[in-house]
Image (tube, rainbow, N blue to C red):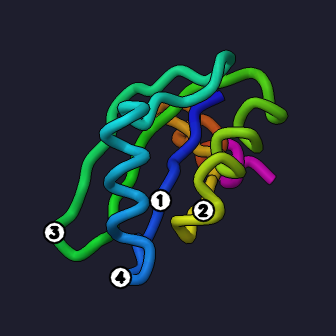
Amino acid sequence: MKYIVSWTLPQGTFNAAVARFLETGGAPPKGVELIGRWHGMSGQGFAVTESSDAKAMFQYQAQWADLLAMSVTPCLEDVDAGAVLAGLGKR
């Protein structure tokens, strides 16, 4: 399953978050594949990840929880969302 991971970097934790990111590369834990990650200039960013392990996704969020406000949302690609939406008209 794919997930959209979004975060906000508060000013008060900026230096600590930068240090951790530079030290670790921001790599997710085993069981989570990082598909892509984007950083905005406003302190916000997002990533797309893939995992079949909800515990590993929770670990990914937890390893940054002391520095970032992070949200993890399961998501579907267009073809899968379209199939669900097409089925709505057949009720």
Q: Which element is circle 3 on?
A: loop
Which mark's residue is nearer the viewer, 3 or 4?
4
Q: Kindly report the distance in space between the C-alpha atoms of the residues bearing marks 3 and 4.
A: 12 Å
Q: Position of residue 24 (x, y in %)?
A: 42, 32
Q: Which residue is mark 4?
A: 11
Q: Which residue is mark 2?
A: 71
Of the numbered discs 3 and 4, the one sitting upstream in the chain is: 4
Q: Amino acid at mark 1?
A: Ser
Q: Kindly report the distance in space between the C-alpha atoms of the residues bearing marks 4 and 1.
A: 16 Å
Q: Amino acid at mark 2?
A: Ser
Q: Amino acid at mark 4?
A: Gln
Q: Which element is circle 1 on?
A: strand
- 34 vs 23, nearest the viewer: 23
- 86 vs 22, nearest the viewer: 22
Q: Is residue 61 magenta?
A: no
Residue at the image point whose x is 66% and y is 24% from the top: 51
Which mark's residue is nearer the viewer, 4 or 1?
4
Residue at the image point whose x is 65% and y is 17% from the top: 30
Q: Which element is circle 2 on?
A: strand
Do labels 3 and 2 touch, CB within 8 Å? no
Q: Quadrant of the N terminus?
A: top right
Span colored in magenta: 87-91
Q: Which residue is mark 3?
A: 41
Q: Position of residue 48 (x, y in %)?
A: 44, 38
Q: Position of residue 22 (x, y in %)?
A: 31, 39
Q: Amino acid at mark 3?
A: Met
